[in-house]
Image (tube, rainbow, N blue to C red):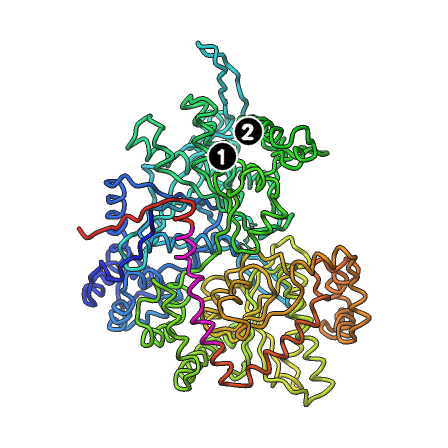
Amino acid sequence: MSAKKPNVERDVTINKSEFKAAVVRHLHCTLGTDENKANNHAWWKATCSAMQEQVLEGIRKTQKTHYLNDTRAVHYFSAEFLMGRLLSNNLQNFGLFDVANDALNELGVSLSDVLEEEPDMALGNGGLGRLAACFIDSLATMELPAIGYGIHYEHGLFRQEIQGGAQIERPDSWRDYGNPWEICRPESIQEVSLYGYVETKYGENGRIQKEWHPGHIVKGIPWDIPVVGYGGKTVNVLRLWQSKSSGYFNWDVFNAGGYVDAQVENVQAETISKVLYPNDETEAGKELRLIQQYFFCACSLKDIIRRYKRAHGDDWSRFIDQVVIQLNDTHPAIAIPELMRILVDRAELDWDQAWGICTKVFAYTNHTLLPEALERWPARMLEKILPRHLEIIYEINHRFMKEVDKKWPGDNAVKARLSIIEEGNEKMVRMGHLSVIGSFAVNGVAELHSRLVKQNLFPEFDALWPGKLTNVTNGITPRRWLKACNPALSKLIDKKVGADWPLELKKLEGLEKYAGNKTFQKQFMQVKQQNKQLLAAEIKESLGFDVDTNAIFDVQIKRLHEYKRQHLALLHIMALYRRLLENPDYDMHPRVFIFGAKAAPGYKLAKDIIYAINKVADKINNDARVNQKLKVAFLPNYRVSLAEKMIPAADVSEQISTAGKEASGTGNMKLALNGAVTIGTLDGANIEIAEEVGDDNIFIFGLTVDEVNELKASGYKPYDYYYKNPEIKAVLDWLETDYFTPGKPGALASIKQSLLDHGDQYLVLADYEAYSKAQEEVDKAYRDKERWAKMAIINTAKMGKFTSDRSIRDYVERIWKLNACPVRKG
Ligand code: 8GP
């Protein structure tokens, strides 16, 4: 039982002239244009189509191999896949990047310009969605039979514009002009039922039978996105479901004169996959969201069962050997009662047998402890949309309560805590509880987070089923997040440790012995300098001002959330500004603070923080007294492809969440891998990063989880810090003036209010002083060029643990029990 290391040798052989011919052929025959007329967009599509020939061949071989070997496979259920762009990644993974570059060059076209034409596939919000994308990359690379299942959103995460400093959301249209990668599979369309009522019947043998009479039926159309493993052997797919009305047109209504009404059902059905909910760690308790979740789970389960039945007919006994389903957070938790419904109502298995299957098929990953992100659905809403599923959930709960009673006889308090149903004004269904009860394994995403899941979120579950709750620390794919996004550093690394580090990231440790070597330090920092120049050009183009590439590039990129504390960084920037105004000789190395962040459209304070960053940036960047030393750049529309430009250029990585709140973080890993040094709290995977790089190569500050709890328990008073620390007082008061928002005093006051009058829930003020001191240490360290270079190199060298291949190996060996299934030529 193992996930073998994949072979580096490439399976695809296509040379430059063949590639060139394929691109031209697609210009002519697929796009109906020619070399003289084609713009970059057409060249992009033609290049994708040329690649797609290789990709489709890879899919065919992979699926045939999996079918012939009747393999066990993992099915990764996720409402989000934040894929980014695919062309550069697919070229890299097939080993065809240089071939394509040369081929296009000869055609007079620049590959890098062509790559810029690709819209990001942004079918996710943030961490959880990008993790899913890294995981399916690793699964294909490790030649593991796997399929990702999700939703084919017509509009992904909104495009962010900044107008007058404020975030404006615009629709994302990633496939308006067609997407060359996706393959429609009408032969695998599924139907999904919704609404209606349940009829109770008595079968011949006296068995009670339930029949769901749905009120609506919608169609799920599968679109496959290829997932090319590094080395180009295994090409798995990500299958995304698009919703369509099942009756193409309601002729009865139409004939009766109701032309518009006849369309209504179509529109409603198509709304299901229309748009991604732009929420990140906030609740989206909307009927449509529940329908989205059920829609993709029901389609995917039917798809899995269809494939299983093709090999095993109606014999369910091997289902648990063939199928494992990973639930990426609770969004797909409704799959648990859905599988029960299929097994009990349709396949007519008895309850215990069905439950035995379910609880060996599902595993669940928790990605957050924030109470507002833990999904709960009103029972009445479930009853309306999925009446049979609510009955099944009640039955699961009823049986589970008996088990609880055995362990804690008569303890009603524990029952109330563990029940799937939360009683209150309104009965709610707790999807986290359902997920834990219906799964055989539950994991958190970093050591600390998993410990807190056990101790705080699900302590009784841990007592009831010891060993079920476990940890799998997150990881990132080094193919995208170093090899493809940082070619200069990759080449330098190849020379020192060989070229197979993208498959065995621990090989980067070979760099450690050069960390003190002056020549290597120079080369390493020269690459960083080049990358900073590229980012400076991006900043100039996007924001219109210059930044000094000798300054420290201090980068904070992530969703905007109070717990991530972008406003802590903002207060510190304002304090530096103030210090420089008060003392023009204030001694600091020039620094550019660079942000990228989207706020959920309904999250007022998060949007206020974006506004404040931009307003403070405007003032500082235009203040000649300080802007030789200090600049602030908020790059709009943070997304995967922008991250690929920012990460290689970062000197400092800001990971400053309140301890206990960031489940893991993955940006922290990407930045460190590219030689950025972290300033961070003891939170999430920062702790494991610190263990790897050692205390001398990271700037840790602030309260620990225990200290946070103690401070809160003893009654945290943010005003104490306000009165005690004149700098805190000055910058908070500054927010209330019209200094940054001329003519609009108070426009930034909500931040001050949240920190003082609303209790500073995330302890920004309590950590301020420690943060500010740690930043002084960063400044000091950076000025010592050799020391800094050494730190940066060690960060890259020690990131081996954080490859998503290691995470996947953990899942495979400890949870999924899968075997690799190598795909051979022919
Ligand atoms: C994120 C966590 O915040 C982040 O620390 C972690 O690295 C990442 O998941 C991957 O594990 N959580 C979410 O994105 C999340 O909970 N999103 C749900 C609300 C949609």
Q: Which mark is residue 107?
A: none
Q: Nearer the viewer, residue 548 or 524?
A: 524
Q: Which residue is mark 2?
A: 396
Does the residue at mark 2 contact the one at mark 1 (Cβ under 8 Å)? yes
Three-letter code, disc 2 = Ile
What residue did someone put label 1 on? 336
Seen as rendered, the residue at the extreme bottom is 585
Q: Answer left or right for 123 relative to 184.
A: right
At a point 54% along the width and 43% down the height, the residue shown is 330
Amino acid at circle 1:
Ile
Q: Please tell me which residue is depicted at 22% across the width and 58% down the height of the picture.
A: 11
> Which secondary structure, mark 2?
helix
**Place of residue 13 in the rendered image (x, y in percent of width and height, measured from the top left):** 20, 61
Magenta stretch secondary structure, dominant: helix
Establish if 256 lies above or below 55.
above
Q: Establish if 591 lies above or below 40.
A: below
